[in-house]
Amino acid sequence: MTPSELVTSVGAGKFAPAYYFWGSEDYRIIEAEKYIAHQFLPDALYATNFRRLDGRKTSCADLLAELAVYPMLGERQMFAVSDIQHYKPTDLERILRMIAPGDVSRIIVFSTPSVRKPKKDSAFLRNITKVAVDIEFRKLSHAETASQIQRKFARHKIKIEPEALRLLSELVAGNRGAVETETDKLIDLKESGAVITADDVRLTGVGYAVFSVFDLGEQIVTRNVALALKQVQALIADGNTPSGILTILFGHILSLYQVKNGRRLEPFRRWLEGKFRAQAEQFDNRTLEQMMIDITETIAETRKTGANDVLLLEALIIKLLSEEKKAGEKKHFPGRK
């Protein structure tokens, strides 16, 4: 099933008893979990019957105990279990055996963060898809993003100026959930038959611009310590994993390095070259190289059992924003003069 097919199916009230979400776009995974929960659970039950569980911090026995409790009196419940790949194959087999066959009164969504996404020919993926419907989430391309935005406004008989469309597409940076959030704000602002301008986008887009993962990368390269840490806290509170944020940050710095050295970006990032180029001018190659090393080392640390991912992420942010970085990192790759 594709993400668009999921939206269509869930919007029509058709739910699978179990899903497995994976891919390169952590934000879309989180938004999809929320979307299913809001469609499946009555508003009164959302806070109490939607349970998030971290596979890295929840033992197999504890997870089985959670899943063993079925809702009473016809009530519905939903579980979102992240880092499901963390369990041993024998434990995963026990978990999957327990939830099959599915129950119409509950939904279980398993997920894997982008930094640990499985190979398509892996035994893990083959096993979990025997029970759960798997959906791979990728970033939307620039063209897909613009098309989604235009279709949403057309349904409400609202038009958008070309510059406003370009700005809004850049703001959401390929995030499907952000497309919904930002277009809804503008629909509330405008009446049927109105035209959305670039100023309208700037007015309503502040909230998402402040707390998007992409904007966190911008705060790092512009060295705004307080706002960067505030964004980290907001992103984690919204369900993003530290490892997922680190992966996106690495991609952001890598894009700066590629643009600075005249290399082509990945297709889904290519339309942001102008924005990356302006940031890249603030750094030399040595600093960007060291920043990528720092991020890679922190990703490795988060994979160690017992490591406090949030503290490691915050420590990295402070390190990247340090005065030493501002002056230019002295350390460099072997052989670099």
Image: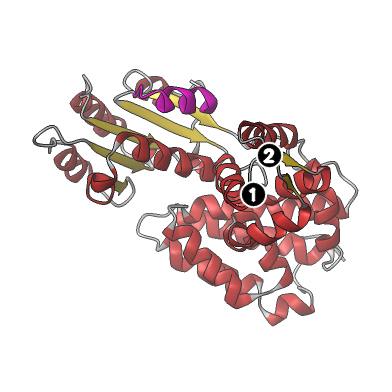
Q: Main secondary structure of the magenta part?
A: helix
Residue 123 part of the magenta segment: no
Q: Any mark on residue 158, and which? A: 2
- Circle 1 sits in a helix, a strand or a loop, which is it? loop
The answer to whether one can see residue 119 in this image is: no
Residue topped by disc 1: 190
- Viewer-nearest residue: 71 or 89: 71
Q: Tell whether label 2 touches label 1 (CB within 8 Å).
A: yes
Give neighbour class at mark 2: few <14, some 14-19, many 20+ (Cα, 10 Å): some
Q: Which residues are magenta?
A: 3-15
Q: Is residue 60 above or below residue 293?
A: above
Q: Quadrant of residue 166?
A: top right
Q: Residue at x 57, y 61 (%)?
A: 211
Q: Any mark on residue 105, and which? A: none
Q: Residue at x 56, y 42 (%)?
A: 180
Identity of the residue furthest to the left in this view: 73
Q: Residue at x 49, y 32 (%)?
A: 118
Q: Residue at x 43, y 25 (%)?
A: 134
- Viewer-nearest residue: 164 or 331: 164
Q: Position of residue 61 (x, y in %)?
A: 17, 42
